[in-house]
Amino acid sequence: MNDLLFLIPALPLAGFALLMFFGKRLGEPLAGWVATAAVAGSFAATVGVFLDLVSKPEHERALTQTLFTWLPVGGFQVDVGFLADPLSVAMLLFITGIATLIHLYSIGYMHGDEKFTKFFVYLNLFVFSMVMLVLGDNMVITFLGWEGVGACSYFLISFWFQDDANASAGKKAFVTNRIGDFGFMVAILFTFATVGTLNYGGIFEASGAMSSSTATAIVALLFVGACGKSAQIPLFVWLPDAMAGPTPVSALIHAATMVTAGVYLMTRINPVMVLAADWVPWLIAIVGALTALFAATIAVAQNDIKKVLAYSTVSQLGYMFLAVGSGAYIAAIFHMITHAFFKALLFLGSGSVIHGMHEEQDMRRMGALRKLLPITSATFIVGWLAIAGFPGFSGFFSKDEILLMAWEKSPALWAIGVVTALLTAFYMSRQVFMVFYGEKHWDRPIAEAVPELAAEREAAGVHEGHGVGPSGEIHPHESGWKMTAPLVILAPFALGAGLINTPFWDGGKFLEHWLEPVVHLGEAHSTAGTGLKVGLALIATITALVGIAIAVVIYLKGRRDLAEKVEQPILANGWYYDSSIAAFMGGPGRKAFQFIADMDKKIVDGAVDGVGTVVREGSGKARLAQNGFVRSYALGITIGVVVVVALLLTKAVYA
């Protein structure tokens, strides 16, 4: 199967090229079906590679393929090569599989959009870039895919760029990711300067001779890049605004692809992290824990159905980095897989709700939609229970593994994780109850149903459009099969994906055994006894149930007084973190950058222009001596001779 590795990225690339040149001729919906088929073919090729690896002994589960040498420069050489090992294949399975479902969903969601074909051009290019990121056998190919998904995210987030907010969201994502990418680039330079290769196999073979300080610098710089791509403090601000893009984009970016790239990168270089200073894993774990808690507190007060899920994604990514910092790479990948299924399900479910509510995204305008959207509501509830950590659902298993390893790292980190789990269960229950249960707020004009929301929109001058539904009565309806079929397919995985790594029966640790050859150097192993493990699991379970119970009391029992105490303005505004950055960049920051620009223009450019002016003016004056008269030249020669003779005589006298 190693000869067929190239098909995994080649098919989405072929779909992109075909739609780029012939997309307008294909039109809607054929362009969408072509794009979907290309990604589905990539998924089929990945399944073939996976089955091939499963059939091999553990120590032989790695396929490589080199297509050609891309950059041969002296001792520096970069090949376009692929590495299919347990880590990359595990990621490719859910990346291509979920991306296929998102493409199918998009055919229905984007129906009637004037840029229907262009949307699928971007989607195929995004999938190709993500596949290259994961499948590349060296850091440069990974970085190529890394930058590709960043560029595609800009195109997709700002897809409806006619609205200023959407265009700004795309630019924010692009700029924020560039900050993190600087760390990745410098890490690449450090790595090559140290070991003389950028191929992962060569790096890991030479890592034994790498000094601790060099390994520390490389890992710390890569973590900067991971913070940008995977939205960790302080670079998480772009992710909530990414909701400006169409909902399938939100599912693609937030569930299985771009935002997990940072976790993948830190797991991939785990042999180098083993050599780094002790403070590096601590830094990763602390940043992850704080990000998880910080984003969860914000999510409890959001009213936009997609923003709740966006902050939830930031929080869940924090869990994954908490696991990485605790040495629990398998737990991090385990949670990445379960998160991919239930978060894709939740985002696509939210898109189905928005579609059925005629583009309305504010949950205050919803309520009692369970019977009108039966498929959407049933599958959304599965995703809710999975992310809340309800016993038996996928998130229950993966989150508990992270909390166990966090306990062994530090009880303080574990406590932060448990509080975050409580908040997660609460805000997701709040969302479900506000959307699918309670009192309906869509059967009458907005001014009558939700007067505070009507006042907010009038004050802000917000009109109907993407994310804003009609001001009059809304008639909700269930989505078509193209949108509901992916929900029905994802729901069983959101429910049962935890079974790939559960200790409840022999052979239940499939993922652990599968990833062990890749992460064995850096993986930490639990030393806790059975009693402690059961106790921690019980605490996490009770915590999730308490979070759900609190939401029941507040939102199902109609305790609006308690809701107002929870939904504090400071939380609704994200602790004013984003607005503070915007205020600084638009005020002192803008003035500082303008000062630097003026200095560059007047001093740096002025110095260069001044030299040019002096040379030009001096040349102009000197040119006057060249008048074409022989007598003038003879006079010049005579004066020169006199000067030379005078200098010689002067030297002779003093000698």
Image (tube, rainbow, N blue to C red):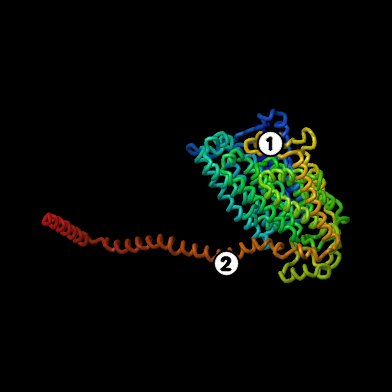
**Whole-percent x and y of residue 123?**
69, 49
Q: Is residue 116 left or right of residue 615?
A: right
Q: Is residue 514 shown above or below 401?
A: above
Residue appearing at x 57%, y 67% in the figure: 587
> Could you tell me residue 630's position as x and y percent?
21, 60
- The residue under label 1 is 515
Whether residue 488 is visible, yes or no, is yes
Say which residue appears at 85% left-offset and 59% top-offset. 556
Q: Position of residue 410 (x, y in %)?
A: 66, 47
Give the SS element for disc 1: helix
Q: Which numbered tag is attached to residue 7?
A: none
Q: Residue furthest right?
A: 371
Q: How many marks?
A: 2
Q: Nearer the viewer, residue 422 or 93?
A: 422
Furthest toward the left, the residue is 653
**Which residue position is annotated with label 2?**
587
Mark 2 vs mark 1, foreground winner is 1
Q: Nearer the viewer, residue 383 or 480?
A: 383
